[in-house]
Image: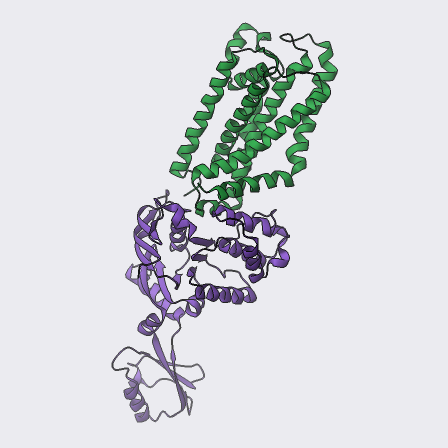
Amino acid sequence: MNLYAIRAIYQFELARAWRTLMQSLATPVITTSLYFVVFGSAIGPNMAQVQGVSYGAFIVPGLIMLTLLTESISNAAFGIYMPRYSGTIYEVLSAPVSFFEILLGYVGAAATKSIVLGLVILVTARLFVSFEIAHPLWMVLFLVLTAVTFSLFGFIIGIWAEGWEKLHIVPALIVTPLAFLGGSFYSISMLPPLWQKITLLNPVVYLISGFRWSFYGVSDVSPWISLGMTLGFLVVCLIVVWLIFRTGYRLKS
Amino acid sequence: MQPVISIRQLTKTYASGHPALQPIDLDIHKGEIFALLGPNGAGKTTLISIVCGIVNPGSGQVLVGGHDIVRDYRAARGMIGLVPQELFNDAFESVWATVRFSRGLFGKPRNDAFLEQLLRDLSLWEKRDARIFELSGGMKRRVMIAKALSHEPQILFLDEPTAGVDVELRRDMWEMVRGLRERGVTIILTTHYIEEAEEMADRIGVIRQGQLVLVQDKATLMQQLGKKQLSLQLQHPLAAIPAELASYPLELSEDGQELVYTFDAQQEHTGIAELLKRLAEHDIDFKDLQTRQSSLEEIFVSLVHSHDVANGEHA
């Protein structure tokens, strides 16, 4: 195990986040704060309780998930796309590191960033609405698992993308809509029956439902199913990454 | 002695179907400076990239220090430092951070004293906190070299090291290469500047269309293939070469003051004595004469050209 290499990549990536602190941290925090101001504080008091939770508190887990998904993907995608774009990837490829170590460095750093961000948003949310966390350990488990899984997913996108456009297209056209329609702002029991069925095809539903359950003990689907779906997606991503590394796809011509 | 790099039957065909390397066999000796010469697109960079692990090999085997580059890639790659042809840099990183990153990536524990000396040797120490995009092209090149040397490699690859580099940096670079060799570092450089190979290399390999056309000691190569020229400064200018001498490979300078005779130094009969006799018969008098060995560049051009002709590429 080349621990020095893992640490080098990890620190290098975190240093990049530190250098762009405004962009990495302030932007998502400000955006999320705006959601709380509009939905939580302005509209929330006029809304009925959802599943026994005030609307302002109800949207907290969904908003954290929303940010966690998009930031994990974009952090990891950018992290590996950048050296491919600038050409500095040659050094990583020529170094005595295994693919698994490369993955640990890049995905670990991306996941760390989005976990920190998720916690910052959690604290920010607490300033606007009051809530308690019923199952803190489960909350952390879902947080970490989602961050790692979607960082892996982002890593795949960063390797697949051949241009900046492709790099942004998956998060913008697929992930954000799925996250919004996955029950960030509503419970799927509020939907018409047909749409309740259709929406179960959206993997993000399970993430948000499970995460919300860890806060309030109520959920649209069983938290075990949520956990299973998240782990399933994690395994799929790992297999794809393994194939990428085995074949050298887009990395080694 | 076991070669430090041993390449056996190495081939590479890109996905486009372009055969970048025909089967190549090559041994690099420990501590030598080996120059890989060849025109653009000949396969120099592909060969280097495979040995360094950036490009997957097609078939064949490469051993670095006895370690297979695929099966035992950690041991193999750990020995190698690579300075690629192009300036690939993390524009927003500081010089210090990027060099430290490289050392860690190659599995070496942090050693600030070593890195400081390295940066000082490369005249980069003053710029250690500068971000790379602020540096000049020459300085960026130095950063690339510092990164390649940051993990104390035993083998250094320099891919077109002096392309677009100013005179001062080129001189510094050769000084550095000589210093590394004294410490026992093996250096493999690619170039299409022949004078570079001529000045620096112990051995030269010529690659063309993915084939190693020739591998030889520089001295032997220059001797074996070297044409010599005899130039005669004439006493009285000539209007034309006398018809009786047409069978000789003679050239007359434009002003008619100089007559140049090209001969092969390796031949038993160079024909010089006979030529001088014939000149005397024609009353062609000369006041001075000199002989000159042709440069590696001329050798190279003739080699590549004769190869072209052999392949029927040039009508």
Chain identifier, colour purple: B
B15 up-or-down from B38: above or below = above
Residue A37: x, y in percent?
Answer: 73, 20
Check the picture and name the quadrant holding the C terminus of chain A: top left
Question: Which residue appears at 57% of the width and 47% of the height?
Answer: B90
Side of A15 where B68 appears, left or right: left
Residue B185: x, y in percent?
Answer: 43, 61
Residue A61: x, y in percent?
Answer: 62, 19
Q: Nearer the viewer, residue B199 or B282?
A: B199
What kind of colouring is applied to the model shown?
A: by chain
Occupied quadrant, residue B190: bottom left
Q: Nearer the viewer, residue B274 or B228?
A: B228
B10 up-or-down from B279: above or below = above
A21 up-or-down from B159: above or below = above
Occupied quadrant, residue A248: top left
Examine the rendering and report whether any part of residue A31 can be seen: yes
Examine the rendering and report whether any part of residue A163 can be seen: no
Q: Colour of chain A?
A: green
Question: Which residue appears at 55% of the width and 10% of the height?
Answer: A220
| Residue furthest top as drawn | A193
Residue A226: x, y in percent?
Answer: 51, 16
Question: Which residue appears at 65% of the width and 29% of the height?
Answer: A28
Occupied quadrant, residue A232: top left
